[in-house]
């Protein structure tokens, strides 16, 4: 049984990349990090171009908040196009000091992180950052997502690798992702694993295989068509 809501045990690869002991997998790639987030999750969902007031992004796996900060930076660079919401599902929340250490590898993200870290350090999981409302839903996403009343316009599917974190890539959970996607909504993920792509297709997405970041040949993205 997964016991959630405890900060996870970490090791640090090369002193800067956090690796979750439980999953034996890094939170982000040493070669890229922020650039990979922009390629996979932002460009993969056609963001920031699609942002508009009320736009809702959801994420499986909050981790270090790097995807959140990349999105906040993109939202600002796009001229702060109205209030948006960012909901993330996380079972094993990192502590503020661990997040700060991880983000220090990305000066641009670290420079934007202070208001987020100040709130996170208090234990708050739901608060505003400029015009973006952040809601981190703690607990196992297999339990929390089915109960979530929201629908996202864009999903970031960012569990650890499907081989090491199959809980976040099951057919059932990906069907819940589709069920919690607005009409015309999209997803993006770094993986092109066949079973993940098939599950997303079966759930109602038209799935495309796109060039991956760096040495990864492929990634996946899609749009809800039914
Ligand atoms: C690759 S990391 C996410 C990286 C993150 N998006 C970032 O920007 O740093 C995967 C995350 O999924 C979380 N996770 C793993 N299994 C989960 C589950 N069953 N429910 C919710 N979160 C889970 C892990 O704790 C970890 O934070």
Image (tube, grey):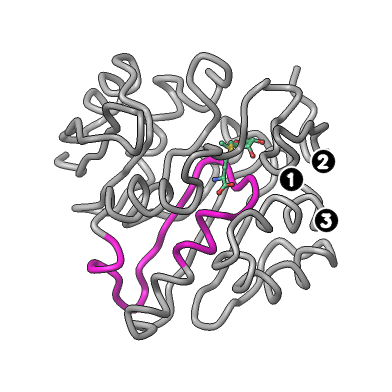
Which quarter is ligand 1 in?
Answer: top right
- Checking the image for residue 97, the label placed there is 3
Point out the image quarter for the C terminus. Answer: top left
Residue positioned 51% across, 74% down in the render: 132
For mark 1, what is the residue? 93
Q: Is residue 138 above or below residue 106?
A: above
CA gap, disc 1 to disc 2?
Answer: 5 Å
Residue positioned 40% across, 74% down in the render: 75
Indicate yes or no whether the magenta region holds residue 48: yes
Residue, far front = 14
- Mark 2 and mark 1 in contact (Cβ < 8 Å)? yes
**Percent position (x, y) of residue 170?**
45, 20
* Viewer-side residue, 105 vs 126: 105
**Percent position (x, y) of residue 163?**
51, 14
The residue carrying mark 1 has its beta carbon less than 8 Å from ligand 1: yes
Query: How many numbered marks does the figure carry?
Result: 3
Q: Is residue 108 above or below residue 177?
A: below
Residue 77 lies left or right of residue 29; in this view the side is left
Label 1's element? loop
Point out the image quarter for the N terminus. Answer: top right
Dot placed on the residue nearer the N-terminal end, 2 or 3: 2
- Checking the image for residue 7, the label placed there is 2
């Amino acid at each position: 049984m997964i016991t959630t809501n405890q900060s996870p045990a970490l090791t640090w690869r090369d002193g800067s990349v956090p690796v979750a002991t439980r999953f034996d997998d890094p939170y982000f790639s040493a070669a890229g990090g922020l650039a990979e987030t922009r390629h996979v999750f932002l460009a993969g969902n056609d963001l920031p171009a699609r942002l508009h007031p009320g736009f809702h992004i959801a994420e499986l796996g909050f981790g270090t908040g790097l995807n959140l900060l990349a999105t906040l930076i993109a939202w600002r660079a796009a001229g702060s196009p109205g209030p948006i919401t960012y909901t993330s599902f996380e079972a094993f929340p990192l502590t503020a000091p661990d997040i700060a250490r991880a983000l220090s590898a990305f000066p641009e993200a670290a420079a934007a992180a202070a208001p987020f870290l100040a709130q996170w350090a208090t234990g708050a999981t739901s608060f505003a950052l400029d015009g973006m409302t952040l809601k981190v839903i703690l607990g196992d996403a297999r339990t929390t997502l089915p109960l979530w009343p929201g629908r996202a316009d864009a999903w970031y599917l960012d569990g650890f690798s499907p081989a090491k974190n199959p809980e976040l890539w099951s057919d059932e959970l990906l069907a819940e992702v589709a069920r919690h996607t607005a009409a015309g909504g999209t997803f993006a993920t770094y993986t092109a694993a066949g079973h993940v792509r098939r599950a997303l297709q079966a759930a109602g997405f038209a799935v495309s295989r796109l060039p991956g970041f760096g040495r990864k040949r492929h990634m996946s993205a899609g749009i809800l068509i039914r």
